[in-house]
Image (cartoon, rainbow, N blue to C red):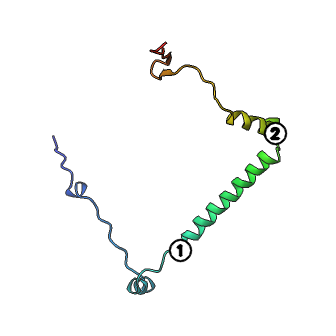
Amino acid sequence: SRIFLPSRSLHQPRTARPRPRSTKESAAARQGNPPAPMAGKYIVAGLVGSCVISYACDYIVSQKKIFGGTIPGTVSDKEWLKATEQRFQAWPRVAGPPVIMNPISRQNFIVKDLNP
């Protein structure tokens, strides 16, 4: 039949007491805080280094083709490029009738010409 009542210290938050400063710390505090280390140079160096590494990896994989493969003839052949460019620039271009696109139902409808 004893009633337990918690002490008052359980309900009050504890505050941290500042530790006493040494003479060096107090002198530094009076003069102002020293500047933070120059982190910018490390950030820039890291960005430049990562760009160099990524360029080197891209060059080795895509140009030197360390995993095999070849460049397709449609890319490397100059005659193919000329023929393709002539077809792109050819007039008149031929197209089908206009189409209404409905992306929701994924159905496309051909528009009938009102003037036959």
Kind of residue sitting beneath label 2: Ile
Q: Looking at the image, tell me whether mark 2 or mark 1 is earlier in sequence order.
A: 1
| Residue at 48% in and 22% down | 101
Observer able to see residue 77? no
Residue named by callout 2: 71
Q: What is the x, y in percent for residue 86?
A: 73, 36
* Image quadrant where residue 33 sits: bottom left
Please say if 41 is above or below 54.
below
17 relative to 76 in the view: left or right:
left
Residue 17 shows which numbered tag? none
Judge depth for marks 2 and 1 and give the one in front: 2
CA separation in Å, label 2 and label 1: 49 Å
Viewer-side residue, 25 vs 104: 104
Observer able to see residue 106? yes
In what quadrant of the picture does the N terminus appear? top left
Crowding near pointer 1: few (<14 within 10 Å), some, many (20+)? few
Check disc 2 and report its element: helix, strand or loop: loop
Residue named by callout 1: 37
9 relative to 36 in the view: left or right:
left
The reply to whether callout 2 and callout 1 are in contact (CB within 8 Å) is: no
Please say if 45 is above or below 92.
below
Please say if 19 is above or below 58.
below
Viewer-side residue, 42 vs 34: 42
Crowding near pointer 2: few (<14 within 10 Å), some, many (20+)? few
Check disc 1 and report its element: helix, strand or loop: loop
Kind of residue sitting beneath label 1: Pro
| Residue at 52% in and 21% down | 98
| Residue at 16% in and 43% down | 2
Viewer-side residue, 99 vs 116: 116
